[in-house]
Image (cartoon, rainbow, N blue to C red):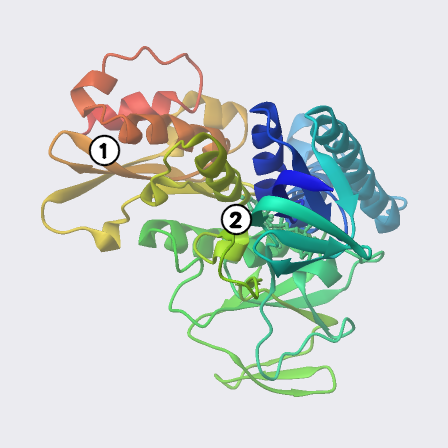
Amino acid sequence: MEYDYGIIGGGPAGYTAGMLLAQKGYSVVLFEKEFLGGTCLNKGCIPTKALLHSSEIYKNALNSQDIGLDIEIKQFDFKKTAEKKDKTVERIRKSLELAVKNSGVNIVYANAEIEDKNSITANGEEYKVSQIIYACGSKPREIKGLEFDGKFVLSSDDVLKLETLPKSVLIIGSGAIGIEWARIFSNFGVEVSVVELAEHLIPLADIDISKRIERIFRQNKIKFYLSDSVEIISGKKVLLKSGVEINPDFILSAVGRVPIKPNFNDVTVIGDSEGKIQLAHYAIHNAKQFALGIECDAKLIPSVIYGEPEIAWVGLREQDCGDDCKGVSIPIAALGKSWCDDATDGFIKIITKNDQIVGAHVVSKEASALIHEFLIAIQNGLSVSELKKVCFAHPTYSEGIFEILLRT
Ligand SMILES: Cc1cc2nc3c(=O)[nH]c(=O)nc-3n(C[C@H](O)[C@H](O)[C@H](O)COP(=O)(O)OP(=O)(O)OC[C@H]3O[C@@H](n4cnc5c(N)ncnc54)[C@H](O)[C@@H]3O)c2cc1C
């Protein structure tokens, strides 16, 4: 069996590269040892967002007295919520499988091993290829003293297998995964505590985003401990360095992911395996870069954290700026649409340098969509004066762009 390309790993990086190369007429074999769609579809982006959506329905249903709806929960079966999440994943996986097969890629479901730069073995068979693409992704980072046991210390993979909700949970780490799970659990009424080693929640975000999320967490009674870490675990008792004692049903340790690297140098590595930016859209872009030669500016990869309100940012943060930059923000409550949606908590902030936008930071409903409008402007060097000419529809969150430009 001989192919132009042998791709190991069927996540966003691997299947995107496979489909694009096959569309260009190359013969491609793709190896996947578990499920097509990788971490993103099976253990990451999709199942968490499906659960988040269910948790928001739950929370909003209980908080709808102001529209005359007074709901009493007679029964809540989280197992059904978990099944719905699994069905969502299966549905998408089926369509993906069809799309990859239709593109002409030969999918081999097996663990693949690189023999040399032109040879891969899987299922006891040898596959000769002209080039190997390694897209094996990453795995949850384990830290000393918090080794995963699947019972008291859970990884982001383990927590997706829950069939019942805990009463209380301790989340270690306040990156995207930690924040999203804090919101999912809290929406379902679980008592949540978050421990973060840095001085603020979401340490990678602009400082105003971190501070606003801290305020929102306080309002939602999500406890958080900053500049803190787990000191001792004794049974189910967790003692933090600060001296605080927490007694969670379990710990979710979400302190990043470790890239899975090839044991061979002469291969092309894309996606999480590359160890640069661990996001699905970066993995997809990485694949496009390889297959189509479309360049990707790593400084302009958007970050999104989901939940109510969404959090999104791209480009320079206030704390990265010198005196030549200016930060301007408007409260989301300035927009009529936010009042209609009961979603007035948040802001849009831009960082400008001369007449250009160099960073955008949004805490708002629809922030995940809004950030792309800024991204297109930044990437294309559109000046503030040019953007002012755009007519934004009313009532929308996009109108916030116009409002903020008026203040710039
Ligand atoms: C809880 C969670 C939530 C996330 N949410 C988001 C989000 O909202 N947005 C976002 O952009 N990113 C999110 N991510 C990150 C995103 O999932 C990853 O960045 C993305 O999946 C990386 O794609 P990849 O193709 O590089 O690797 P992966 O998706 O990890 O795919 C690698 C594949 O390789 C296979 N594989 C590994 N070794 C072998 C082998 N030897 N032989 C055959 N197959 C092999 C694996 O089984 C896997 O299917 C989330 C991650 C987690 C854990």
- The numbered dot on residue 357 is 1
Give the crowd class for mark 1: few <14, some 14-19, many >=20 residues within 10 Å: many
The residue indicated by pointer 2 is: 271
Please state if 347 lies on the left or on the right of 216 as rendered. left
Determine whether 361 is above or below 382 in the image.
Answer: below
Query: Is 39 located above or below residue 360 in the figure?
Result: below
Q: How many marks?
A: 2
User: Reading the chain from its start, which is encountered first: label 1 or label 2?
Assistant: 2
Point out residue 22 in the picture as x, y percentages from the top left corner.
62, 28
Question: Does residue 173 lie above or below 293 as drawn?
Answer: below
Q: Quadrant of residue 106?
A: top right
**Tag 2: amino acid:** Gly
Of the 4 image quadrants, the one containing the N terminus is top right
Q: Residue at x 13, y 29 (%)?
A: 355
Please indicate whether residue 341 sits to the left or right of residue 314 in the image.
right
Quadrant in the rendering for residue 245: bottom right
Pick the residue in front: 253 or 296.
296
Q: Amino acid at mark 1?
A: Ile
Classify mark 2: residues with Cα within 10 Å, few (<14), some (14-19) or many (20+): many
* Residue nearest the observer in this picture, 275 or 207: 275
Q: Going 58% across and 82% down the picture, which residue do you hit?
A: 144
Residue 47 seen in render: no
Residue 242: % across, % down: 48, 83
Image quadrant occupied by the C terminus = top left
| Tag 1–tag 2 contact (CB < 8 Å) | no
Callout 2: CB less than 8 Å from ligand 1: yes
Q: Which mark is drawn over residue 313?
A: none
Nearer mark to the viewer, of 1 and 2: 2
Q: Position of residue 250 (x, y in %)?
A: 72, 71
